[in-house]
Structure formats: C-alpha cells, structure tokens
Image (cartoon, rainbow, N blue to C red):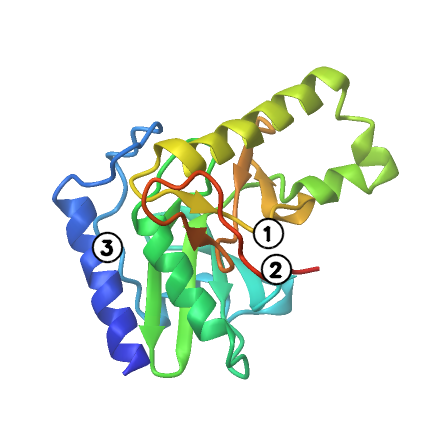
Amino acid sequence: MAMEFLARLCSCFVKKLRDGGGEGDEDGDGGQSSELFFDLRTLQVATNFFSEVNQLGHGGFGPVYKGLIPNGQEVAVKKLSLNSRQGLKEFTNEVKLLLKTQHKNLVMLLGCCAEGPEKMLVYEYLPNRSLDYFLFDKKKSSSLDWLRRYRIVTGIARGLLYLHEEAPERIIHRDIKASNILLDGQLNPKISDFGLARLFPGDDTHLNTFRISGTQ
C-alpha cells in the first residue's frame, strides 16, 4: 500500500508540473525535463549503482549520492535506508510538502522513485555542499567573509518567511541546522530535508509540536 501511494504521489507531481503548476516559483524552471518519475535503473546507472565514490553524505534517514541523468543534468539522489521503518513516513511527508513549495531559497525537487523496496528523492545538485562543510573547516570558513555570511543568513530567512507566510501550505521545518542548508555555485543558500516538517493548521501563526524534533 505504501509503495502504491508513493507511485500515485509521484505521478501526481509529474502531471502538476506538466500542466504548468508550481505556485510561488521564483526560479523560472520551465525547461526542466518532463520525465520526473524516475525508474530505479536510471538512478542506478546515474550514480554508478550508488557507489561510495558518488556518496555526498548521509542524512538522518539514508545516504545521498551524486548522479548524472541521461539529459546531462547533475542531480542529488536521496536514498531511504531499507531498514528504516520511521523513514517511510518522513519520505512521503517530504514529497507531499515539496509538491506545494518552490522558492529560490528551497532546494528543488526534480522527481522521485518508488520501485520495489526502494524509495528515493531526486533533487537539483548543489556543488558547494552544505553550510556546515564551510563553517567547521578552518580553510573553507575563511572564504566566508561577513558579507557572504550576511547574504546566507538573509537567504535562509527569506526561505523560512516563504514557508511560514507565503507558501500554498504554511510549513514549519523543525530541523533547521547548518547541514540542512545547501549552497549553490554562488554560495546562495537553499533549505533542504523536509522529512520532519509540519503544516500550520488554519490561520494559526504559532504551533506547539509537543516534543523536541530534529536530527543530529
């Protein structure tokens, strides 16, 4: 049942973008490929069968790999660990939320895969990895002068403002940290990893989530 749900969800995503959906898009990505429901074989070949050489990192629910899809575009493939029971809920949650949210300071979801036991999300590839990679490296941190740091903080704030007040469904992220802030080629920040996000109910401006959330 879960796999059938994910397949229907991804198919809905494909139809939405083909029909010109995507409210709040500030990036003008009209040239994206229409094949947004990826099959497993395509992602295996793209990532050299998920080789360690292609691994970009490991999130709270599974590893992330760099890949090259047939149209020549570089992508990041988030692969849910097969032994993660909790991760299925977060995976479906992330797809549903990102269907509704597009902004220049949010990482762009390009598609997904739900084939057999495999569940994956396919994102745009951001070459400068995550903010923590710069902050906690002595050599890299020196490249972040105060103007760049200010621009990064401002970009993160704009992304959060969009999620809280401007998105079709208002969202709280619940896992904002340096490793979930990705940087593009110009060091512009993009918020990633919506597995723990929650929707604001109605017109509320505050939400008590009752328990501490987040990943290390």
Label 1 neighbour load within 10 Å: few <14, some 14-19, many 20+: some
For label 2, the crowd category at 10 Å Cα-Cα, with few meaning under 14, some 14 to 19 and many 20 or more, is few
| For discs 2 and 3, the disc positioned in front in the rendered view | 2
Residue 44 shows in the view:
no
Which comes sooner in the sequence, label 3 or label 1?
Answer: 3
- Residue at screen point 21% across, 54% down: 14
The residues tagged by marks 3 and 1 sit, at their Cα atoms, a distance apart of 24 Å
Q: Are marks 1 and 2 in contact (CB under 8 Å)?
A: yes
Of circles 3 and 1, the one toward us is 1
x, y percent for residue 192: 52, 47
Image coordinates of residue 121 in percent, x first then y, are 41, 60
Q: Is residue 190 visible?
A: yes
Residue 75 higher or lower than 83, as above or below: above
Three-letter amino acid code at the position of disc 2: Ser
What secondary structure is found at the residue carrying circle 1?
Answer: loop
Residue placed under numbered mark 1 in the picture: 175
- Measured as percent of width and height from the top left, residue 11 is found at 20, 62
Q: Which mark is residue 13?
A: 3
**The disc labelled 1 sits on which kind of residue?**
Asp
Point out the residue furthest to the top here.
147
- Residue 21 as seen in the image, left or right of residue 173: left
**Residue that mark 2 sits on:** 213
